[in-house]
Image (cartoon, rainbow, N blue to C red):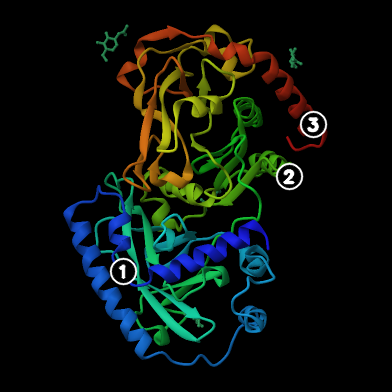
Amino acid sequence: MSRRQTKRLLKKACIFAVVGVVILSSFLILPGSFGPQMVSTKIQGLQEKTQLKMETTQSSFIKESYSAEEKDFMGVSAADNFFPLQKSRPERCSRIREEKLQFYEIVQGSVIYSAFLDYRFKDQTFIRMISIFPSYSESPQMYCHFLDLRTEEYFTSVVEIEELGTNDGFTFQGYLSSCDLPDEIDSYTLCSVNVSMEPESFRQTDENTKQIPLHVSEDQPVDTETYGLCIPPISGEISAGRLVEFLELSEILGVSHFVFYDANLSDKTLRVLQYYQEIGAVTLNPWALPQNIASNIQDDGQTVALNDCLYRNIDRFKYVAFNKLEEFIVPLQSKRTLEIFETESDEDTAGLCFQGFTFDTSKFEEKRPHILLYTQRYAARTKVPTEESARCIVSPKNVFSLELNAISNPSETFYITRNVETRVGHVFRYGECNYDECNSSFQDLTMAKYREELEKRFNLTMIYLQQYRVV
Ligand SMILES: *[C@@H]1O[C@H](CO)[C@@H](O)[C@H](O)[C@H]1NC(C)=O
Ligand SMILES: *[C@@H]1O[C@H](CO)[C@@H](O)[C@H](O)[C@H]1NC(C)=O
Ligand SMILES: *[C@@H]1O[C@H](CO)[C@@H](O)[C@H](O)[C@H]1NC(C)=O
Ligand SMILES: *[C@@H]1O[C@H](CO)[C@@H](O)[C@H](O)[C@H]1NC(C)=O
């Protein structure tokens, strides 16, 4: 029996041991920063849920037919209910994993993009869903439905929601939707979750219910040596040179994998990203927001995508960073950013946030036009950091939700966000500067120390891309 399987068994034993005290747990573990309104709906949700649990248990009914996947599972489990299954979860859920990521519309204007199992809390496993709802009208009450394959009994839990970021006046906003995984449901057998407007399992139809695939992490060890980087949705054409410079320099600084969201990129830009995808450095997720939402949400749903990226990478990286294209988290006293994490953080750290300075590319370009690489061309940056341009590297396991420039809620109240002193490291962003602070500039040649290595890597990649007619 592998260590992973043993751990899973132990976890299961634990869950059985705590049956009975779990009802209040979802209420207790959530971060403490929600308004009174949120809390009261939560209590109401819990009462409803308790009631529902009783109802479903009493009025369970027999399911008549099983999908191939379910039969497959039962065949294995019938032989022995106790020992772990032969197939790993990624294998079992392979059919559903191949489905392309998309927005599932529950009702008009309410969509769910992705669903994750959240095992972080000892007493209760949750389903977390990245979703978008109207900001101002009451969000629809939704339910998660589950089938216990052993007893053929259905279980239902109420979906509870938390805001992701702020709506900033837009019609649509991101939410983290959560439902408890009923104790009777073995998470190991789950490949998807039914989200429905209908509280009764047996009244589910294709109209009121969507089957949302559960993200299954690859069976690979967590990468602790480097860090993953999540980039907000991008669209249109981005010059190949700028993209390659961003990717290569980020790698020099310690990023090993990039997660992009494609909100309608040009074919040429896609080809560059696909090259990096083929060598394993990039994951490219589609981000095709429904038209009515796309035009009425802040920054292409940036906060929503970043929280998807957070949950998607909890089991993949020990550290995950969040910044836009042409932004870099730069260490000053060590070569790689991760060394800062090792010295500045401990097990109670949710993440480190770095203050940001802007190199105003609209202003200073004319001074050194002969230099091709933009991180080498601009030498004048703002003197004062701005809150908007702070960026964070987090321990994803310790974070509940975040925004581009801050950790909104840690997963436990005692996890803290540390602000890194600018002498240790900071964020450089290259772009237009629209803040008041922009007109006080300051000579900064920090990036020159990466020049040689960056040029070498940049040249090699560009030659390759040109040779194979990618660009
Ligand atoms: C999920 O919904 C579909 C109909 O959309 C239904 O056939 C299936 O039995 C449901 N599964 C569960 C676990 O409720
Ligand atoms: C995507 O971009 C192309 C060209 O930039 C444009 O013609 C097309 O309408 C866009 N599609 C969507 C769905 O926005
Ligand atoms: C910088 O901006 C402030 C106001 O934002 C203005 O009062 C000041 O004169 C500006 N300084 C320069 C050098 O342009
Ligand atoms: C990269 O290419 C540029 C121009 O093509 C050249 O000037 C530069 O010396 C090259 N740098 C390295 C390190 O190869």
In space, the residues marked 2 and 3 are separated at their CA atoms by: 14 Å
What numbered label is drawn on residue 176? none
- Residue labelled 2 has its Cβ within 8 Å of some atom of ligand 4: no
In the rendered view, would you say 405 is above or below 379?
Answer: below
Which amino acid is tagged 1?
A: Ile
Q: Crowdedness of circle 1 by 10 Å Cα count: few (<14), some, many (20+)?
A: some
Which amino acid is tagged 3?
A: Tyr
Q: Crowdedness of circle 2 by 10 Å Cα count: few (<14), some, many (20+)?
A: few
- Residue 28 sits in quarter: bottom left
Extreme right residue here?
A: 467
Q: Residue at x 44, y 67 (%)?
A: 15
Mark 1: secondary structure: loop
Q: Residue at x 43, y 79 (%)?
A: 207
Which quadrant is the C terminus positioned in? top right
In the rendered view, would you say 68 is above or below 281?
Answer: below
Q: Residue at x 28, y 65 (%)?
A: 24
Q: Which residue is mark 3?
A: 464
Answer left or right for 353 relative to 339: left
Which amino acid is tagged 2?
A: Glu
What is the count of numbered marks? 3
Among numbered discs 2 and 1, the one appearing first in the sequence: 1
Q: Which residue is mark 2?
A: 278
Mark 2: secondary structure: helix
- Residue labelled 3 has its Cβ within 8 Å of some atom of ligand 4: no
Among numbered discs 3 and 1, the one appearing first in the sequence: 1
The picture places residue 157, in percent across and down from the top left corner, at: 36, 73
The picture places residue 102, in percent across and down from the top left corner, at: 53, 60
Answer left or right for 60 relative to 339: left
Q: Which residue is mark 1?
A: 23
Q: Crowdedness of circle 3 by 10 Å Cα count: few (<14), some, many (20+)?
A: few
Answer left or right for 454 relative to 227: right
